[in-house]
Image (tube, rainbow, N blue to C red):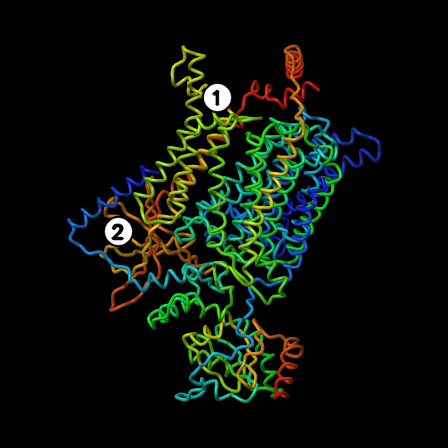
Amino acid sequence: MLLSGFGFHLVEFGHLAAYLALVVALIQGLSPLAARLLHRPELTRINFHASIAMFVLTTIGAATLIHAFVTGNYSVQYVASNSNSHLPIFYKVAALWGSHEGSLYLWVWVLTLFTMVVAFHGRRRYPDRLPMVLAVQGLLMVGFFGLILFLSNPFLRLFPVPADGRDLNPLLQDPGMVFHPPMLYLGYVGFSVPFAFAMTALITRWKSEFWIVHIRRWALIAWGFLTTGILLGGWWAYYELGWGGYWAWDPVENASFMPWLVGTALVHSITVQERRRMLHAWNLFLVITAFSLSLLGTFLVRSGVLSSVHAFAVDPGRGAYILAFMVTVLTVSFGIFLARGGFQESEEGMSSVLSRESLFVWNNVIFTVAAACVLLGTLYPLALDALSGGQDKITVGAPYFNAVMVPIFLMVLLLMAVAPMVPWRKANTERLRRRLLVPVSLAVVAGSIMLIAAWPMHWTAPVASALIAFVTGTIAMDYARAVRQRRQQHATETLWRALWRTLSFNRRHWGGMVVHLGIAIIAIGLTGSGVFRQEKAVVMVPGEIVEVGGERLRFDGVRSFVRDNYQAIQGQFTLLNKNVLVLPERRRYPVQDMPTTESGIHSTLWRDVYVVLAEPAAGNGVMKWGVHVYVNPLVQWIWGGGMVILLGLFLTLSMRRRERATSPAAVIAEAR
Amino acid sequence: MKKFLIPIGVFVLLGILLAYGLKLDPRKIPSPLVGKPLPEYHLPILESTGKKLSNSDFRGQVVLYNVWASWCGACKQEHPVLMQMAAEKRVPIVGLNYKDTHEAARQTLQAAGNPYNVSIVDADGRVGLDWGVYGVPETFVVDKQGVIRHKHIGPISMEDWQGTLRPMIEKLSAGG
Amino acid sequence: MKYCMWALVLMSMAPNLLAAQNGLDSVQEDPLDRQVLEIAKDLRCAVCQNQPVAESNADLAKDMRKVIREQLQAGKTREQIVDYFVARYGDYVLMKPPADRAGLPLWLAPPLVLAVLAVGGWLFMRRRTRQTATPAPVLSEEDRARVRAARNQQES
C-alpha cells in the first residue's frame, strides 16, 4: 500500500530528464573548449543536436509536471503547494509557473526553446559560429538547471501525501496571470540570444557586419515579447488588484521595465551601426547590460531583497545563488568585453551633429538615463538600509517615479517626433524646418485646445497632447509624402495599392513608424487616465445612485454565489446612462482563506467606469456597502497601442528577402 | 574601451550591495521614537476592571513594554523567553495587549503562564499606533526618565535577551 | 486627443439630462472621506509592502485611516497629520521620499545623470565629427551583381 502511495510516478521520469538536461547542457557549454583543447574541431558539431535534446528533455520535465498538476498528484510538493482539486483545469496548467520553482523552470524551458530555434536558424547561415552561440546558451542553462535541481526543485516529492493541495495563490487565478509570465519570460530570456551572439562575436572576433543582423532581429523579438509581457502585467493589475490603476512602480514592475528601457535603446542604436557603421562596442555593451538587467529582474523578484506587493517566497539561499550566477555572468561577459571589445571599434565618423545618427545617440542618452533612474529608485532603499546599518529606511513610491519619469517620457516623445524627419549623415536645416512646420503647428493647436477645454489641470496634459500630436503629425506627413512620391512614379496604381506598397516596400522603416504610432497611442491613454481620472468613495444602500464624472451608477444590491474555487459576493450596479450592468465582486478563496476584489469595468473607447465593491458597513438594519467608483479616461488606448506596436513589429520583422539582401550591412558583408 | 570601466564599476558596486542586501530584512522598520519619550498613554488594566495606568506610574524605573496579542503566532514563540525574563526579575515587564479581546487575552495568560507584572489593554490599537507599532510582537526598553532607549521588532530570542536586552537594562538600572 | 475632449464634454452633458428626468439625487461623497483618502494616498502602510494606506485592506491601514479622520476632525492640517506619522514610523511612511535628509540623493541624481550623459554624448559626437569621415565604400554595379549571384547560388 505504501508503495502505491509513494511509488514510481511519471514525475520521476521528468526529474530524471531534468538531471539529464543538466548533463547535456554541460556538454553543450563546454564543447568548444573541449574541441580546442583536444584539437578536434568536429566535436562542436554535437551542439546542434545537444540543443534539440535540451528542448526535448526540458519539455518532458514540464510535461510530467503539468501531468502531475492535471491529475492532482499531491505527492509532488510543488503541486501540493500550488494546486487544489477544485482549481479549474485552465489554472492547473498555468499553476506550473504560479510560484518560485515552476517559474524558474519556465525560464529555462523558454531558454531551451530559443536555443533550439537559433540552432535551426544558424545551421546553414553561420555554421562556423553556431557552436559558440549554442555553447554560451548552454552555460546559461547549466546555471539555471543547477539552481532548479539543487535549490528550487519542482520535482521533489512529499511524504505523507496530503489529501489535497494548498491551492494556487488566488491573485494568480486570473486569465491575465496565465499569459503574463510566459510573455515576460519570453522577453527576458529572449535577450539571452543577442547576448550569446555578442559573446560569440567578442570571443571569435566575428566581423560586425555578420553578427549585427542576428542581434538586431533577436533584440526586436525579445523587445516585442517584453513589451507584450509588461502590458499584460498592467492589464492584469488593472483588472485584478482593484485600485483603478495599471502601473504602481513596484520593484517587481521596475525589474521588467529596466531591461525594456535598455532594450529600446539597443534596437535604436543598432540601426546606427547597421546604417552608419558606428557604436559597435556600445551596442555590445547594451546587449550585455540588457541581459544582465533581465537576470537582475529575476533576482529581485525571486530573492526577496526588496519589499513588493508581489509577495513572493523569500529564500536567501536561492537569492545568493542567483546573485552568484548573475555576478559570474556579469564578470565573465564584461571581462571578455573589455579584453576583446577593442576589435569591434567603429569604422566611421559622423558627418554632422544634426543628423539621424546624432539623434539616435540622444535617444540612447535618454533611455540610458531612464534606465538609470529606475534602477536608482528601485535599489536606493536597499542601499540606504545597507549604508546606514538598518537605521535609515525610506520608501520610493509611485509619486517619485512619476515626478522623475514623466519629464523623461516627454523628452522621448519630442525626440520621436523630430528624429524620423532628420536624414542620415547631414540634415539640411532649411528643408527640416519646412518639413516640421505642419506637425509643429498641429502640436500647438492640440496643446492649446487641451489647455482651453480642460482648464485647470496638471501641466503634463497640454504638453503631452502637443507632443503626441507632433509625433502623429510627423508620421502622417512622412507617410503622405512617401505615398505621393510613389504615385508619381507609378501613376497607374490605385490609391489603396499605393498606400500598401509604400508600407510594404520599406517595411523596416514603416514598421518602426507604426511602433512609434503605437507608443503615441499608449501616451494618449497614459495622459488621459493619469491626469483626468475622477474617483469617488461612497457608502451606498441598494437603490441609491452615485454620479462620477457624468456617469450615473445605480446600486441594485448584492448577490452571492459559489464557484468551484471561490465564493463570491457580487455587487449589482446599473450604469444608467448606458443602461448596462456592471458587476464587481469580492471573492474569498476558501483553501487559502484569502479575499480578493474583482473590479467591475464598463469600457468604451473614451473612458472606463471602474467599480470596486469595498467593505460592508451595517447601519440601522440596512446593509450599506462601501463603493469606489473611478472614471478612467482613455485606458483602453493603452492596450490598443500595445496591439499597434505588435503590428508594427510584425511589419518590421517581415522584411522581405530582397530588402534584406540590399540592406547596407548585407551588401558590405558579402563584398568582403 | 577604458570609458566602459565606469558603468562596469557601477555594476560591481551593485553586486556588492545586493549581496549585502540579502542579509537585510526589508520588513524591519527602524523607529524614530528611540531616544524620545514614550508617547503618553492612559489605559485600563487587563486583570482588574476600572483601574487605569499611565506613563507616570512607572517614572523612576526601567520598564520593558512588550506588545502582544492572543492572536499573534510569533508571540507564542517568544513566550518562554518572556517567562524566563520574568523569573529573573530584573525589570518590570508591562504587556501591551494589542487589539485583542479581554477573554482571549486572559485565557491565553492563564493557559500558558503570565510573564507580565501587569498587562494594559489597547483594544482599538490606538496607543500601539501612537508608539509606531506595526507588527506584533514588539518590545520597548524605557529608561527611568520615560525615554525609549531600544525597540526590538519581532519575537525575542534567548540570545536577544542575554546579549542585548539584559546588559542594556542592567546598565540603565545602574545609572541615574 | 481633441476629439476625446469633445466627447468628454458631450458625455458629461448627457447624464445631466437623465438626472433631470429621474429627479433623483445621487449619493454625495463625504468630503471628510475624500480628505482622508487624499492624505492616505501619500502614506505607506507599514505592514503591506509598498502599498499606500489608501489602497490597503490591512488592519494597520484601517487604523491609520481612522487616525487621519480623527485628526482632521480635530482640525489638524495635512502637514501636521503627515508629521505625526513620520514621527512614529520615520521617512519610511512617505510614499514620496523627502527632498532633504536621506532622500536628497534621489532627487539630485536624475538631473545629474542626465547632465553627465548628455555631456558625454555631446563630446562623443564632437570627437566623431572632427574625425575625417571615411566615405562609405561604394560598390560598383559589377560588385553588386557578383554579390547577388554568389548569394543566389548559396541559397539555391
Q: How far apart are marks 2 and 1 (CA)?
A: 48 Å
Total numbered badges shown on the rendered structure: 2
Q: Is residue B9 left or right of residue A39?
A: left
Q: Is label 2 on the same chain as label 1? A: yes
Say which of A570 and A551 sits in front. A551
> Is residue A59 visible to us here?
no
Name which quarter of the figure residue A160 lies in: bottom right
Rendered-image quadrant of the N terminus of chain A? bottom right
In the figure, residue B75 lies in which quadrant?
A: bottom right
The chain to which mark 1 is attached is A
* Percent coordinates x, y for residue A654 in the rendering: 53, 25
Residue situated in front as seen by the camera: A130 or B39: B39
Packing grade of label 1 (10 A; few <14, some 14-19, many >=20) is some
**Residue A666 visible here:** yes
Q: Which amino acid does label 2 sit on?
A: Leu
Viewer-side label of 2, 1: 1
Residue A403 point in image, percent of width and height: 47, 51
Q: Position of residue A77 (x, y in %)?
A: 59, 54
Q: What residue type is labelled 1?
A: Ser
The circle on residue A553 is: 2
**Residue at 48% of width from left, 73% of height from top?**
B71
Q: In this view, does A287 lie to the left or right of A29?
A: left
Disc marking residue A504: 1
Image point (50%, 86%), residue name: B118
Q: Which image quadrant is residue B53 in? A: bottom left
Q: Measured along the vertical axis of the image, is residue B84 above or below residue A328?
A: below
Residue A430 placement (x, y as % from top left): 48, 26
Name the one closer to the observer, A351 or A127. Answer: A351
Vertical side of A287 occupied by C49: above or below: below
Residue C21 lies, with reference to residue B98, above or below; the image says above
